[in-house]
Image: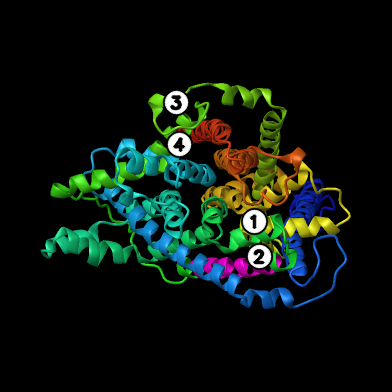
Amino acid sequence: MSVDASTVHGLPVSDTNRRSSSRGVLMGVYWVTFVLVAAMVAIPVIALVYGSFRTSAPGLPGDWTLRNYAGLASSGVLSSMSTTLVIGLFTSVLSIIIGTAIALILHRTDFRYGRIVMPLIGLTFYFPSFILAMAWIIVGAPGGIYNTVVDDMLGMPWLRADIYTAAGIVFVMVLHQVPFVYLTMRGPIIGMDPIYEEAANAAGAKPYEVLLRVTLPLLGYSLISSFILTFVMTIEQFAIPALLGIPGQVTMLATQLYLLVRFSPTDYGLAAAIGVALSLITGAAIWAQRRVTTAGRLTTVTGKAGRIKQIPLGHWRWAANLLCFGFVFLGLIMPMVILLYTSVLKWFTVNPFDGMYTLRNYVFIWESGSTVGSFTNTLIVSGVGAAVGVLLGLLCCYFTLRLRPPGYRALDFLVSLPFGVPGVVLGLGLLWAYAYLPLPLYGTLTLMIIAFVTRFLPYATETIGGQMVQIDKSLEEAAWVNGATRLQGVGKILLPLVSPSLQGAYFLLFMAFFREISSAILIYSVNTSVISISIWSFFEQANWGLASALAVVATLIIFVAMALITRMVSTAGRG
């Protein structure tokens, strides 16, 4: 039997060549993506480790030493480490209790105001941490609104409070982390099969017994996972501990790293060693969280139909209302009102009837070249950086979830690695790296974009990958059978189907870049200052009016972006 030379394995030679060429292009893009991601992630980490063994500042001659790691055993660093762990544990425990309680109230009881509270908690989630801390400083500082009211106006000095304490840091941290816990626990609570609770009810168990013996144990792995993630986000937090801790001399590891780099006497080597230690702690916690989510799981979602029976609040309705509305008031409404009030004052005063009101702070924002420049820089970094992050995230998801070429597991590991590297540590690593690399990036917006994309690349891959794994590969295979190449299958089948997640990832990264400060605080220059840095600088200069006005504008932009995301997602869902 003769074989037609114009066919290979039953396919025309031209189709075979096209498919080979298409796969060759994809493999070329894969290796470019792999090298780029590896460089973005590995360079600052390697540079940080390098700096931890040096005696000099970045870019200056020095010697090799182990003194920096010996410094980790000093009383100051050990004190900062213990403070970090204690604040992290207290914040995580309180956040888990309050966030889970709110999620149970909203989704498992006959709470009447869920449609009001849920979107407000969403807004609280996107409220920038450093702006929240600023608002509570205005309220709870020794000369702030609260102390002036209870001491000078009410004559009750025993009610005075000080936000510049470890307790104050925990309080503001909890306000910042509770929305995250609510969002992580919402899905497991909604998706849990009610058959287990119905069985307990049928056996005569009381509602609180069902909650303690059935509901919470079934949510055990989700609670542990959320607790670990909250702990990681707390100990790597920079803005809240810095704004509240530095005046009160309460030092966490991220704050100490910042102080060692920004203020004399500087010690870049010890700061790098602290950064390595902090990354090891967060990395170990992330590893533990992954083990929890992949090792042991309880089956709480089954194929049987079941309707969740709402638990009547009864006499506890007042407590549910107080918890939900009290949190929204403390975490969102009051801070926004305080910032709005402060932004329109000519001189700060506690009594609104004594205030001299003006819009000069808002006028200054548009007349000042520095603030306009910070807005422009922020829009460039957020717009361009989010696009780069989404493109990299899409490529990484395609190669690790669909194509799976040689080394894809290493790429998946590299992409997830920034989860365990705090933002301020990443900034310090970049500071070390680009002081030695022969690339003119230091002091440019390009370096800021690299820092932000590296830090938030896992956000893009999680958002895009979550939808990509739901798309059946047979759709692309059908296109291949009909003569399409892999590239055509991606362009005509996969991209249109994942476009909603691409849009969501873009807006998510845009908002994250817009409010990011921890990875920018050590690498910005006068010409690359962004909005978050400008707000920080004004507040450090005790210019509360300008800082508040900028914070109000930035927060409104973030809220508008979140509204666009919500509208886009709901439209995509209807489509």
- Nearer the N terminus, badge 3 or badge 4? 3
- Nearer the N terminus, badge 3 or badge 2? 2
Mark 4: amino acid: Gly
Residue 275: which disc? 2
Find residue 338 and report its horizontal and vertical position in percent: 44, 35
Find residue 58 and report its horizontal and vertical position in percent: 81, 60
Main SS category, magenta section: helix
Mark 3: amino acid: Gly
Query: Residue 276 colored magenta?
Result: yes
Residue shown at 62% from the left, 77% from the top:
73
User: Which span of residues is magenta-colored?
Assistant: 272-290
Query: What's the distance in space between the residues labelled 1 and 4, CA to CA?
Result: 37 Å
Residue 355: which disc? 3
Residue 424: which disc? 1
Frontmost of labels 2 and 4 is 2
Frontmost of labels 1 and 3 is 3
Query: What's the distance in space between the residues labelled 2 and 1, CA to CA?
Result: 8 Å
How crowded pointer 2 is (Cα within 10 Å; few <14, some 14-19, many 20+) is rated as many
**Callout 2 secondary element:** helix
**Callout 4 secondary element:** helix
Quadrant position of the N terminus in the picture: bottom right
Asked whether, in this view, residue 390 is left or right of residue 250, the answer is: right
The answer to whether 567 is drawn above or below residue 118 in the figure is above
Find residue 17 and report its horizontal and vertical position in percent: 81, 49
- Nearer the N terminus, badge 2 or badge 1? 2
Query: What's the distance in space between the residues labelled 2 and 4, CA to CA?
Result: 42 Å
How crowded pointer 4 is (Cα within 10 Å; few <14, some 14-19, many 20+) is rated as few
- Nearer the N terminus, badge 2 or badge 4? 2
